[in-house]
Image (cartoon, rainbow, N blue to C red):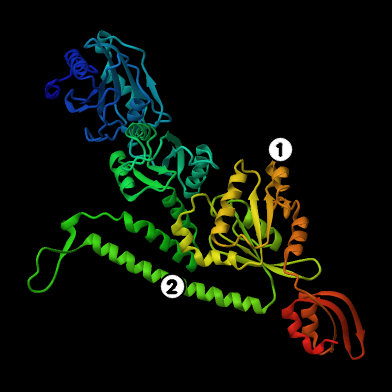
Amino acid sequence: MEELYNREVPPGQIASEDLLIHMAHLTEETGREIAVHINRRGQVVEVLVGDADTAPLSVQSARRSSEGLRGVRCVHTHPSGSGRLSSVDISALVLLKLDLMVAVGVQGGQPVSIYFAHLVPEDGVLGNAYQQSDAHTLEQVLEVDFPGLVRGIEKSIKSGWTAGPEAKDRERAILVGLELPGCNQNWSIEESLAELRELATTAGAEVVAKLVQRRNRPDSTLYIGYGKLEELRLLSQVQQIDIIIFDHELSPAQQRNLENALGKKVIDRTGLILDIFAGRARTREGKLQVELAQLHYLLPRLVGTGVALSRLGGGIGTRGPGETKLEVDRRRIRQRIKDLEGELQQVRQHRERLRRKRERVPLPVVALVGYTNAGKSTLLNTLTNSDVLAEDKLFATLDPITRQVELPGGKSFLLTDTVGFIRKLPHHLIAAFRATLEETVSADVLIHVVDASNPAFVEQMVTVEGVLAELAANEIPTITVFNKLDLVADKSLIHRVASEYPCSVEISAASGLGLQSLLELIIQQLPRDLTRCQLLLPYEAGSLLALVHDKGQVISEEFLPEGVRIWADLEPQTLSRVKEFIL
């Protein structure tokens, strides 16, 4: 094989006869693909050896010229006997901007069918367009005018344009899922990957492919098997992938091994959610919570380079390396985690003070909970005439938002929008967002918002109910709201599921459908510890008269010379404020 470097090709030919025959003999002997890169002077600049199906690519053969093409052609063999170019071959042609991609089918140690392809400029720019030849014999390939072919391509390229890396607005991603027996009882692997696609899109990636493997258990080293790893490597090469996203939390060792084997950035579902949260956090509290979750995720994934980055210990009698940079980084992260937990403890205390302050003003609290992107923020905006950010994306809202809602009859309550839940919600986030989730636990009534237009809405409801049980909030009175009814064509399944929940309503927060029924349900579920009493309020106590109207239910009212006589149903807090005027 080393002799291939000594084979020179006449400048006018794609490849010489002796080079093609020699490569065919080597392929027959080894059963492997062999590739050579040839420059325009006819010199073999690189020899690459693959396996029976693929040959490795290299971008070190030459630099891309100012005319756009790399100035190098790739000639490689196919042991199968067919010289048809594969998708990997075409991908390499486009990615490396090669002069030519040539595939030689080998049979019986002889080149039997030869195909080649070249790029075709569109509007003077080299892109993904290419042209592929028909099958050629060895004699026909030797007659092809290679210099004329290259001149024709470069003549079509705009003058002065330089082929460089194409600017991409978004990273191209592949999704990888593992289907394990008995582990996807509520969610199919397809539904799980569909949700992962939404997460990736929310994070700004462009999902171009997905890969699923069925195994009895994950591989401890790579999570997926070696055969699927090779398929993933080829697919990432064909699709020019920037990032590979796994639908399960990877161990630090698995993530590191995958990145080394694939040569691509690898993240898991947890890392993706943390990335979304980092971009969505707006308040100081939200940023603290996200940073804490990220540090807990990062700490076990730190890797160092050993003694090379160590610091020698100071003092007399020092022996060996001191504290390595890895150890310093870990120590700093642990200290930062400790600091963040202290700051979040102060946040929890502040929230507790605000909660006690709210309790002195007798307004019940209703919390919106539900799966992410179920329409909670839209419902909050509709009921309160607010302009809170509401997007058709996962985790549009991270920080809790509270607004006051006025009910018919003068009563009102506080409505709080909380962070959405999701399947496989990372434990780092549950721990970090404890201060936010406490708003859910302390509510008087929960409104469980369900995206009825999602095909997996039943599974999403099970996930939310599981998280509420984990937070010990499943005993709070709950109204189940089937939202986005206007987007559902066949409502029979919605009606059937809703009939299993006695306190439920079907609405569309965007169009206002069913909101009156929802308000009536809220009134029924709000705390009703009322006492009926008769009051005589003097006219100078106008603020108390307003309080009774605002917080109580007035049955009758009579204006007398000495004041206003009222029959009303009052809550304990209001009753304590007016007890001296009770008749």
Residue appearing at x 46%, y 62% in the figure:
431
Residue 429 position within the rendered picture, expressed as x and y whole percent measured from the top left: 46, 59
Residue 372 visible at all: no
Q: CA distance from mark 2 to mark 1?
A: 49 Å
**Relative to 479, is 217 above or below?**
above
Q: Residues within 10 Å of mark 2 (few under 14, many from 20)?
A: some
Residue 131 position within the rendered picture, expressed as x and y whole percent measured from the top left: 38, 21
Quarter-wise, where is residue 448 in the image?
bottom right
Residue 125 position within the rendered picture, expressed as x and y whole percent measured from the top left: 39, 32
Residue appearing at x 57%, y 64% in the figure:
400
**Relative to 29, is 375 above or below?**
below
Left/right placement of residue 351 relative to residue 236 reads: right
Residue 22 visible at all: yes
Q: Amino acid at mark 2?
A: Glu
Left/right placement of residue 512 relative to residue 359 reads: right
In the structure shown, which secondary structural element does the residue marked by tag 2 occupy? Answer: helix
Q: Where is mark 2, residue-wise?
A: 343
Left/right placement of residue 544 relative to residue 283 reads: right
In the structure shown, which secondary structural element does the residue marked by tag 1 occupy? Answer: loop
Q: Where is mark 1, residue-wise?
A: 490
Residue found at the very far left of the displayed protein:
317
